[in-house]
Amino acid sequence: MGKPGGIMEYDRKEPSYRPVEERLKDHREVEIKAGENEILEQAARCMDCGVPFCHAYGCPAANHIPELNEFIHRGLWKEALDMLLSTNNFPEFTGRLCPALCESACVGGIHQGPVSVREIELAVIEKAFETGLMKPSPPERRDGTSAAIIGSGPAGLAAADTLNRAGVLVTVFDEADKPGGLLRYGIPDFKMEKRVIDRRVQLMKDEGVIFETGIVAGEDISLKYLLKHFNAVCLACGARAYRDLPIPGRDLDGVHFAMDYLVQQNIKNRGNAIDPSLEIDARGKKVVVIGGGDTGSDCVGTALRQGAQSVTQLEIMPKPPEERPDETPWPMWPQVLRTSHAHKEGGERRWSTATQAFEGEFGQVKKLKCVEVEWTAGEPPVPKEIPGSEFEIEADLVILAMGFTGPGNKPLIQAFNLETDSRGNVKADPHRMTSVDGVFVAGDMTIGQSLIVRAISSGREAAQGVLSYLKKKV
């Protein structure tokens, strides 16, 4: 365990951020990494609970959190690193981007603040890179098998890394010009700078993973080609079908999907030019973001950095309570109000709001017609418009950040003749193999839109399925 009585001696310390007036001037990471002494104190708060719900219930990757904290409390960073990497291929990603389900399930969080697991995890992997512990470690031998991974997001990278370490020769294909998927193109730099991805991809290359970018599976290479040249194939193409808002005025200029907006900014951050006729820029504009989740928050932060005149975020769901409600008791993920660093930078949030129509002038969006809603009891609950609550919001730019409805990669799914469920997600057996022999699937393409930590876990599971398949077939 950590220090006896540590949770009584040390308070939980919340993450620190660069000053708002400073961080709004750039797109660099906003969170300030905790110092080593601070991390040692936070690890000392872990009390080695009889049943560690953080590990057994909270963490999708099943990280060994009490053991990790014990190693850190004792200053055993190498042992902590080995423990962390045994369950999570990329702590540098989850340490920056995971909402930390483990912390909501921490026993200490019932009466005290939970252990700062996410920050501890990030400190371990960053110290490992800084001190040279994270160096190329290719497999001692290859077993003569090969696998193709389609997609280089967190699920695809996790599958590739796991298979490579088992001795399989892995080639990762991606249609983009650089690996990373959503991590590179959808996540703003102010949450994770892309040097973090470059560092990891280079390490994987040094360990023997082959990356082929600018290649569209199903078009540039066929399933027949893949199955002829590889012993197994794993699809990890993510969720791509954006949830739309088919209301009057949807076709007006100035109404865009969140991913199109965020991808553009990430491309500009790399120094690449955007066609002015296609550029989505919030400078000097009244911006409305529809959707109250993490992606919506990312859009708020991006618009503020671009110099928006105003930013309003609309959410159709009611405003969550500030304290854990009875409906989501410990150790469940609590349905509480969450205020991101982007929300603290400016803008306004409105809940229980539905958009009825977009209105414009000369083809350009100018305002939204909205109405307040109340949610009726039932399964599932249904929003009901409140008569007389209609209002309008001026807007020059509208960003739709309402999530995804499925993988959306129909040409690829049809080309491979894969079975799907009612939501369009690719069906898989318990070993993550699809309806096509030797073709596996991982991440949001099969589990639906979810968290990065779940994508990594799914990629690891698919890799284990591939390994079992290869033992039987090759």
Image (cartoon, helix red, strand yellow):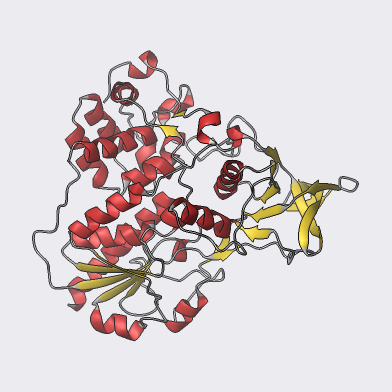
Q: How far across and how far down the image is residue 427, in percent?
A: 45, 71
Going by the picture, which residue comes out furthest to the left? 140
Q: Residue at 8% across / 59% down in the picture?
A: 140
Out of 173 and 383, give the one closest to the viewer: 173
How many callouts does the rendering have? 0
Out of 234 and 474, give the one closest to the viewer: 234
Going by the picture, which residue comes out furthest to the right? 388
**Where's the C terminus, which quadrant?**
bottom left
Q: Quadrant of residue 463?
A: bottom left
**In this picture, residue 166 sits left or right of residue 294:** left
Q: Residue at 45% across / 66% down in the picture?
A: 445
Q: How far across and how far down the image is residue 238, in percent?
A: 45, 63
Q: Residue at 35% across / 82% down in the picture?
A: 223
Is residue 379 something one can see in this rendering?
A: no
Indicate whether 238 appears above or below 16.
below
Going by the picture, which residue comes out furthest to the top? 9
**In this picture, residue 310 sits left or right of residue 198:** right
**In this picture, residue 389 sits left or right of residue 171:** right
Is residue 185 something one can see in this rendering?
A: yes
Q: How far across and how far down the image is residue 60, in percent?
A: 39, 48
Q: Quadrant of residue 80?
A: top left
Q: Residue at 33% across / 86% down in the picture?
A: 224
Q: How far across and how far down the image is residue 58, in percent?
A: 42, 41
**Where's the N terminus, which quadrant?**
top left
